Amino acid sequence: MSGTTGTDIKRRTPRRPYVVTADGLRRIVLGAEARGAAPTAAPIVAQPTGKPLRPRREPVEWHVAVIQAERGDLDGHAREAVAAAAILARPETGVLAIILGPFSGCVADLGADAALVLSEAGDRYDPEHDAERVAAIVVRYRAKHIFLPDKPDADGDLGRRLGVALSAETAAHVVELSGTHAAVRWSGGTSVARAGLPRVVLLAPGAVDARLPFAGAGEILSPEELSASQPDARIRDLGLVALGAEGVPLEEADLIVSAGNGVADMAALNRLAGTLGAAVGASRVAVDEGKCARHQQIGATGKTVAATTYIAVGISGAVQHLMGIKDCRHVIAINRDAGAPIAGRADLTVVGDAGEIVPALLDEIERRRRRNDPEAAR
């Protein structure tokens, strides 16, 4: 597999390290590197939020949830997989979460009694190696049932590989669960088919409510206790391929500068994006006016982005556009109207004409870089 990155553009890394405080707030670890050797110590984990512990005895069997962390956290679909394992567990059933990729959240609040965080699994693509290692853990814990989110990407693929590796009965896209059966939709989604609960369960999104009234024990296990299998020799890492801003999908961009109807000088905005190492997006109005290409459109009728920082230049903030940036961490707005809807979403709003502010930003960045200002260098 060949990885891709950019020398002139920042990519959104799903493994940017941060910790979760006891209050549930995420704090980025400044200066920490997302890649490199996996830490040998257990990850920093937040404490449970005071929910009662699930009644349990010494485990005689285990339910295992296999999930992937993204940006140090778990999405709702992954949390549902752990919740399913916990909800169907009896008092003598332990709940183990196998988390692929760095994770710094609270496993107890997920409902897990124990967790194995395989941080290095997020740094490479080797599905057969992952399936082999997960299967070894499942066998070691004599897992009665294994739960995974049935996503069209890695999780769903891993679950199917795991079913084959274990020669286990597997059900995909499960929409309904109980202690005795699983159900899937068939006949074009108009009917539901039920069968006995299989060993490997691939859950459809929304099949389980992840808001549990109880917490698990939340013990963090050391993956060093496990014997590591060798990576697949048939897969070669071809290294990094440099891409310009136009070659990076907006969905993967860590920093986006987006143009709206208030941008008259697209050349200046493109220079700002190039200077910052940002991808260029656009509102629907800017696309309709021919300022940007259709594939750059962000919003309900365009693309949904999850950048760390989103700079909206001359965008009023129609509800369709706000839907497209709902997952962005920080939003900066440059707009002449301090009461525009985008200002209500923005963490910082600069009130003024984009035609004046964008050139001023370029001049300031250049001035600071001439002074070797570390803030401008970033």
Image (spheres, rainbow, N blue to C red):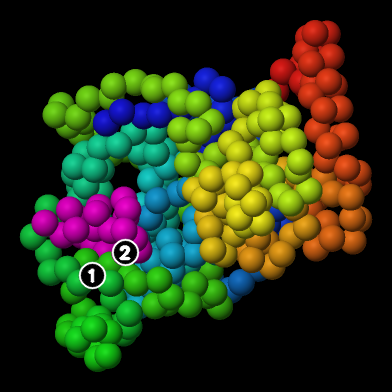
- Over which residues does the magenta segment extend? 142-164
SS at mark 1 in the image? strand
Q: Which labelled disc corresponds to residue 172?
A: 1
Q: Is residue 96 above or below residue 367?
A: below
User: Circle 2 sits on which residue?
Assistant: 150
Q: Position of residue 207 (x, y in %)?
A: 39, 77
Residue, x 20% and y 50% (percent of image)? 135
Res. 18 in view = no
Residue 185 lies within the magenta run? no
Q: Quadrant of the N terminus?
A: top left
Q: Residues within 10 Å of mark 2 (few under 14, many from 20)?
A: many
Q: Quadrant of the C terminus?
A: top right
Q: Is residue 306 above or below residue 41?
A: below
Residue, x 72% and y 18% (percent of image)? 377
Amino acid bearing label 1 = Ala
Q: Position of residue 90 (x, y in %)?
A: 35, 77
Amino acid bearing label 2 = Asp
Compared across the picture, whether 271 is left or right of 298 comes to: right
Residue, x 25% and y 37% (percent of image)? 126
Compared across the picture, whether 22 is left or right of 86 comes to: right
Compare marks 2 and 1 and give the one earlier in the sequence.
2
Viewer-nearest residue: 1 or 161: 1
Residue, x 43% and y 75% (percent of image)? 206
Q: Position of residue 330 (x, y in %)?
A: 72, 47
Q: Residues within 10 Å of mark 1 (few under 14, many from 20)?
A: many
Q: Are marks 2 and 1 in contact (CB under 8 Å)?
A: yes
Compared across the picture, whether 106 is left or right of 55 comes to: right
Viewer-nearest residue: 130 or 6: 6
